[in-house]
Amino acid sequence: MKTNMSNDLQYKVIVGLEIHVQLCTKTKMFCGCAVEFGAEPNSRVCPVCLGMPGVLPVMNKQAVEYAIMVALALNCEVPKFTKWDRKSYYYPDLPKNYQISQYDLPLGSNGFIEIPFESGDTKKIRIIRAHLEEDAGKNLHTAGNFSQVDLNRTGTPLLEIVTEPDMNSGAEARALAVELQRMVRFLGVSVADMQKGHMRFEPNINLIVTKDGAEHKTPIVEVKNLNSFRALERSIDYEVQRQLDEFLDTGRTMEMGNKSTRGWDGEKEVTVLQREKEEAHDYRYFPEPDLVPVEVTGKWLDDIRSQLCELPIKKQIRFVTEYGLSDYDAGVLTAERPTAEFFELAVKAGGDPKRVCNLVTQDYQKLANEKGCSIADLGVSPEKIAQLATMITGGVVSATASSTIAAISVADLDKTPEEIAAKHNLIQKSDAGELEQIVDQVLKENAKAVEDVASGSKKSNKARGFLLGQVMQKTKGQANPKVVSEILDKKLKSFSS
Amino acid sequence: MPNKLLNTGCKELRDKIASGQIKSITATQTVFDAIEKYEPAIGAYISTFKEQALAKAGEIDNKIAAGEPVGQLAGVPVAIKDNMCTTFGATTCASKILENFHAPYNATVVEKLLTADAVIIGKTNLDEFAMGSSTENSGLKKTVNPWDTNRVPGGSSGGSAAAVASRLCFAALGSDTGGSIRQPASLCGVVGLKPTYGRVSRFGLVAFGSSLDQIGPVTRTVADSALMMDVIAGHDPADSTSVDEAAAPVCDYLEKIDEPVEKLKIAVVPQFNAGADKQVQKSIADAIDVYKKLGADIIEINMPHLDYAIAAYYIIATAEASSNLARYDGVHYGHRTENPKDYIEVYSKSRAEAFGKEVKRRIMLGTYALSSGYYDAYYLKALKVRNLIRGDFTDAFEKCDCIVMPVSPTTAFKIGEKIDDPLTMYLSDIYTIAANLAGIPAISIPCGFDNNNLPIGLQILAPAFAEDKLLRIARMYENQTDWYKRKPPMIS
């Protein structure tokens, strides 16, 4: 994917990602404290997560299972035996001054994720590893001369996922992030709420510039701690331009030790230098002696595998092939697992897939948005939506009337769409005999218009529309326009011949 | 007759208290009278809780008077090493960095003692963070050997051993990372048991070397040791390294204590014992003769990797310590330097000001051993040696029930004698370290005195989770000898 600038200057963007995903366990990774966002500072802590003298960690098995679920969904190898390691560094938000993490035996390695593009194409991005660790607390710098530390987040289970540098643009990195969010939500292992910092991204970016036939690699830049898709994409796009400019300006290329770290200024939309040279970090990893190694037995792995659902991208592709939906529609339906499942239940209940899709993604999605809930939570059963779809397909109600029925169905949960349509006079008149009488009457009352149609002149189409409108008016809009149209054309034909 | 009361065994005292023959409050008051008299000279305690202890003793007496059931240590005054967390008093680890640290929770063993209705009378001195073999590294106070106040009590559980030896409590808890229960027990002429790694919960024991640390009893008799084990042993869900009782059942140690081990087969390691002081060697040989007379088979074995135990130990223990002690940084609790320039100085100055010399030395050793580029050569290699030593013991226990050897190459040495020579000091642990590396239980029992009337200890090592057998073997010896009945001259 070379971007053409001129004949003698081209460049390729290389992006790898490190992603932290907060798992939605009830309690922390190594103690019984609740995982809760926004609580009073230092109110969700205990001697264990505070790192008090003498405390010992106890592994949260649920967190390990969630991590393995993600590893499996990422097509990773899951080791039969793994362990915990201590990663040492001093920082005030890390009470033990070491983090319990995984060093040489991550819970997942050598996997890949497929990311979808709007074009309907997909791309495989290789996953190097996925490992479980405990989160640190937060340093707050709002109290003048002092910094304060909130340790509520300390010990929250965090899954770190590292990709190969297989992405070639900010848009691709964003697509991966969005796909990963959709995946962990489908699996039910993370709320993945950006606003709450449940997903954090750190892209590594550089360029391979081809100039005058020679290849040059620009120094790698790591952008720290991004917590929105927009920041991820924009910071990469910004870096691409900045690195290209810098290369053209200085000719600097990648060498040992000149990887730098930058932060993202979301207001100015620029990256800002944090550390010029990558520090020679020595985390002094060694096996955590306070925890026993984890044996991932075949049975346990099978149990976890049985909890996996169909992954969103698979579902999306299947919706296209099985139900004949557009890739766009399938994408919208599979953005959230409850919506996708609701859709499929309605189809299984007999609704035409395309009609159900329109009802779900348009009418009911709008109603759900208004209520601030998911479609499944609206309380309207998939069977009712299937019934409504079938009514549209069968011409029993018009598309316009179906929106009205949808709105009423949410307010009046006891009634079926058929009952609502009947009660509110929304059923289309499709009886040919009845409609023929009305058409005859309209033709009789509007001889001039009939003449205009028959004349075949410019006025012809307009006159036909007028006659149709008159019929609709007489039936208070309940006539099936398709049936009326057919009758009208048959009658008018007889006039002109 | 306070002396007679103070010489009572834990089980006897408990039964007399439970049956109303002796009041716990009397026993407790008697102990505090003795503390008042001898503690200024001995310095075994960092803190004592007289009022609280007497109140607790009174409560237990009331329970007994009311006919309520009471625990296995009902009313018995006991002490704990000051590296176990208690909600009462401070938990200092004999370090200035934790001098005013008050733990918000009780260690599991403390909870177990309280559940057994023991009366906790105080917390004993130790080498700072249990790092040392003489208790001279305490940052807070000096403890001497009750047998000769110019000499060290051993360490790191020197306070517990000195307190038990001088009858300033009926039993105590110590912790043993490389000999810290057994060596001071030997030097003070009392019984010290290091249980199998995983037998007793470490939750609430301030960590030194997490893969080596184990809590155990310091008592005057083997029977008391068994009783203490009955109270403290067992799985703890809060300690993942404590062993599942389905895999290794906890025995009723005291109940079985007087069942001799039939066809007892004892191994000695001649190559290894040769380094000990002649008088120590003689006492060990005499002890072996006692077992011979009881019908035991004595075999000689070779343990090829024991010579590397000290080297491996000082890599593993210091590596773990460097990480375990990282949390004492002045940020969250403990000593904080005044007027730091920035947060880095909060760390560097707080730690520089409050840690003692030996602790700093070990943090540096351990940090070095774990550093990139050195990890494989030091830490990883030490782990391999550790596995080889484990293998030596596995092989040995196929041929015998237990192994006997000295606890310490010498009897109690003079205060100040080794303090400036860390390597010589580290060699004090030469016989005790292997049990920690292998995770197996080992006991030190009194087996004689040298020409200076200083106690000598016999060490018996048994296979993992064979504490019951180990205690029974020790008891067989104890029943034949009366070394354990001797009292330090200063309290006689």
Image (spheres, coloured by chain):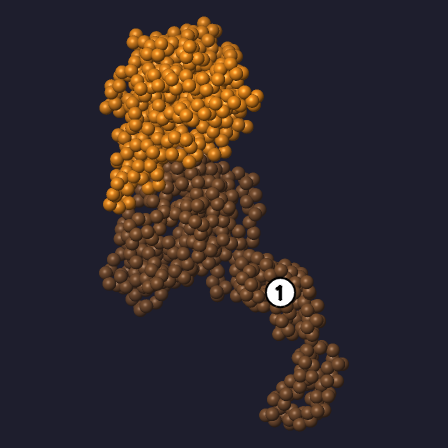
Chain colours: A brown, B orange
Quadrant for the C terminus of chain A, please.
bottom right
Q: Nearer the viewer, residue A112 or B333?
A: B333
Residue A86 in view in this figure = yes
Label 1 residue SS: helix
Name the residue nearer the viewer: A138 or A324: A138
- Taking A433 as reference, is B100 left or right? left
Residue at x-position 26% and y-position 61%? A246
**Towards the viewer: A220 or A229:** A229
Give the percent coordinates (x, y) of residue B45.
35, 23
Looking at the image, is B251 positioned above or below residue A347?
A: above
Residue pointed to by mark 1: A410
Q: Residue at x 37, y 11 (%)?
A: B487
Up the image or down, B316 lies above or below B404; here it is: below
User: Which image quarter: residue B141?
Assistant: top left
Chain ID at mark 1? A
Residue B112 point in image, percent of width and height:
48, 27
Q: Nearest the camera: A329 or A410?
A: A410
Q: Residue B202: give x, y in percent of width and height.
A: 43, 30
At x 29%, y 56%, the residue is A273
Q: Residue at x 50, y 27 (%)?
A: B115
Q: Amino acid at mark 1?
A: Val
